[in-house]
Amino acid sequence: MTPEEMEEVRPRLEAFAAEMLGSLARRDQRAKGELYLRGLMLDGKRKSMQPMAERLGVDHQQLQQFVSSSTWDYSKVRERLARWAAAHISPEAYAIDDVGF
C-alpha cells in the first residue's frame, strides 16, 4: 500500500485498530499498536522494525518496544480479532501459525 493509499484508508484503519486494541490499558500502547499496523500495511519487502519505522518516519525503538517489551495481553486482542473475522468474513476454518504470533 502506498502512502497515498494509506491516507485514503487511514480513518478506517484507525477505527479498526481502536476496536482491536481497545483492551490495552494505556493510550500510548494503543497508539503504538496502530502505528505498527500501518507499518505492516505500507509497501516494502522488509517488515522488520527499522524499515517499517523509516517508511513511517518514526524512531524504530517505538515499534520495537511495543512488540517486544511492552506488557499487554495479546489474548484479548486475538479474541477481538477472531470475533471480528467471524462477523465480517465468516471463515470456514482457522489456521494458527505460531510463527505469526
Image (cartoon, helix red, strand yellow):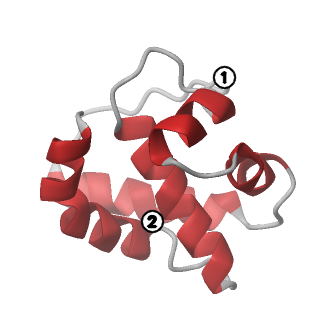
Q: Residue furthest right?
A: 69
Q: Is residue 90 shown to the viewer in this render?
A: no
Residue 94 location in percent, x, y? 40, 33
- What amino acid type is highlighted by mark number 2? Arg
Q: Nearer the viewer, residue 56 or 40?
A: 56
In the visual, does 57 lie left or right of 42?
right
Compared to 71, does 61 lie above or below?
above
Question: Under tag 2, what secondary structure?
Answer: helix
Residue 61 location in percent, x, y? 77, 49
- What amino acid type is highlighted by mark number 1? Val
**Tag 2 residue:** 80
Question: Around disc 1, counting alpha carbons within 10 Å, would you say few (fewer than 14), some (14 to 19), or many (20 or more)?
Answer: few
Residue 49 location in percent, x, y? 66, 35
Q: Quadrant of residue 70?
A: bottom right
Q: Quadrant of the N terminus?
A: top left
Compared to 16, does 42 lie above or below?
above
Question: Under tag 1, what secondary structure?
Answer: loop
**Tag 1 residue:** 99
